[in-house]
Amino acid sequence: MSTVHKFEDGTGEAGICPVCGSDALEYPASEADNVEGIYPWKCEDCGAEGEEQYTMTFNGHYNKN
């Protein structure tokens, strides 16, 4: 993809490269290894690298005895 997008930290869409708009992101770290909600990525199309950051929120208690 040849289009270059402008972006600021904290903006964008999950799974979409903020540089070229491609959905070909590679995630070298597995979710099972990540407890902080930070997922490094590399775009297979343009070579950009960065990380997606997620916030976990408390939704309630489940499976109470």
Image (cartoon, rainbow, N blue to C red):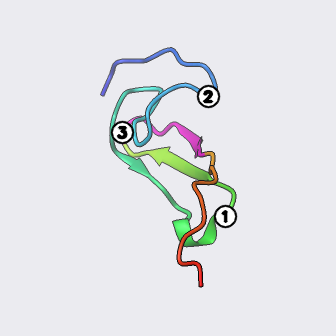
The kind of secondary structure element at disc 1 is loop
Instruction: Tell me which residue sits at (34%, 45%) in the image.
Output: 24
Front-lying residue, 27 or 2: 27
Residue position for label 3: 45
Q: Relative to residue 37, is residue 62 depicted above or below?
A: below
View extreme (right): residue: 36
Across and down, in percent, residue 36 comes to: 69, 57
Specify start and end residues of the magenta stretch as a single range: 45-54
Does residue 51 show up magenta in the picture?
A: yes
Q: Nearer the viewer, mark 1 or mark 3?
A: 1
Crowding near the residue tagged with mark 1, few <14, some 14–19, many ≥20 C-alpha atoms within 10 Å: few
Crowding near the residue tagged with mark 3, few <14, some 14–19, many ≥20 C-alpha atoms within 10 Å: some
Q: Amino acid at mark 1?
A: Val
Does residue 32 show up magenta in the picture?
A: no
Across and down, in percent, residue 14 comes to: 44, 40
Q: Identify the image quadrant of residue 17.
A: top left
